[in-house]
Every structure is written in C-alpha cells, then in structure tokens.
Image (cartoon, rainbow, N blue to C red):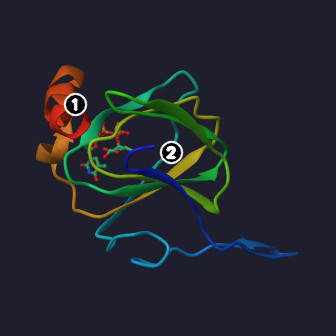
Amino acid sequence: MYNCALLKFKDIASHDGHLSSIEEKIDVPFKIKRVYYITGVGQEAERGFHAHKKLQQVLICLNGSIKIRIKNPIEEETVQLNNPATGLYIGPLVWHEMFDFTKESVLLVVASEHYAEEDYLRDYNHYLNESKPFFG
Ligand code: T46
C-alpha cells in the first residue's frame, strides 16, 4: 500500500530468548530522531486517527498484539502486529488508526523527526484535501 511496508528485523534466537536490533538507514529507511512507546492501553481504546505531513515512522509491537488500520483516499488495509521482529513502516500522508490492543501490549515507535504537532493532520476532511494532489 502507498507509503507503507512490513519490515522484518533480524531475530537472534537462543534458548535464553530473542534479540532484535534496529539500525538507522539499515533496518529502517531513515535517520532516527525520536523513539516513543505506548503502554497501558485499554482493550476498548482506539488511538491515532491522523496522518503526518512529513514524518516517517516504524511501529513495532514488543508484547501482545495491536491492529493498525492504514488508509488513504483510495486504499484501506488492516495490519495486525504481534511480533517484535516485524515493523510497520508508515510514511507521510497515510491515515492510521490503532485498535484492539491486547492487555499488556507495548507499541514501540521509531520516528524520523522530533515531535511537532504542526506535522499532524488530525481532521479527516482536512487530510482528504491535503492528500488530493497525490491521489488524484
Ligand atoms: C502516531 C501514532 C502511531 C508528545 O508530546 N510527544 C511525542 O513524541 C508524541 C508521539 C506525542 N506527544 C503528545 C501529543 C499528545 O498530547 O502526547 C499526546 C498523545 O499523542 P497522540 O494523541 O498523537 O497519540 P496517538 O497514540 O494517537 O499517536 C501516536 C503519535 O502521536 C503519532 O505520531 O503516528 O502514535
């Protein structure tokens, strides 16, 4: 789907557990300026409901499972993240909604830019207007 991709990270497994690493410009296609994580989300809660103008991010579910609905004016898909060695790349102008967080789920996000509220498109009609030139 436009500006989205599933990324596989190395998974170094031993009888003592798993280790994955994420290196900028190698495992993710950008320089990492920010890392944040989301925890303690109730099972009925829904987050996101926005797109970004410039920000690139990779979402990784470190524990439990989370669903992400990704959409643009012409396509829509739902991705379930439940593997710490898998990341969902989300580039600019992708509307995303996170839901069905399981109890104890942990969402880690690596991002290409510092936090900037002006980069958010939080109103869906505004998003449709901004993205029109890209989707015809
Ligand atoms: C995204 C999805 C996947 C900060 O102060 N610094 C930060 O780095 C972030 C990410 C958020 N905030 C503040 C902004 C809001 O006052 O934390 C509050 C909650 O943010 P928001 O409602 O945007 O959270 P989500 O879970 O809807 O979205 C977050 C990211 O904000 C967003 O970029 O793509 O996770």
Picture quadrant of ligand 1: top left
Q: Is residue 69 left or right of residue 17?
A: left
State how far apart marks 1 and 2 are (Cα).
21 Å
- Residue lying farthest to the front in this orientation: 136
**Comparing labels 1 and 2, the label whose residue is closer to the camera:** 1
Q: Quadrant of the N terminus?
A: top left
Contact (CB < 8 A) between labels 1 and 2?
no
Pointer 2 local density, CA inside 10 Å: few below 14, some 14–19, many at least 20: few
Query: Percent from the top left, x then y, of residue 53?
Result: 19, 46
Whether the residue carrying mark 1 lies under 8 Å from ligand 1 is answered with: yes
Q: Which mark is residue 38?
A: none
From this view, report whether residue 15 is shown above or below residue 120. below
Instruction: Name which quarter of the figure residue 102 lies in.
Output: top right
Q: Which mark is residue 39?
A: 2
From this view, report whether residue 119 is shown above or below residue 48. below
Q: Which mark is residue 122?
A: 1
Whether the residue carrying mark 2 lies under 8 Å from ligand 1 is answered with: no
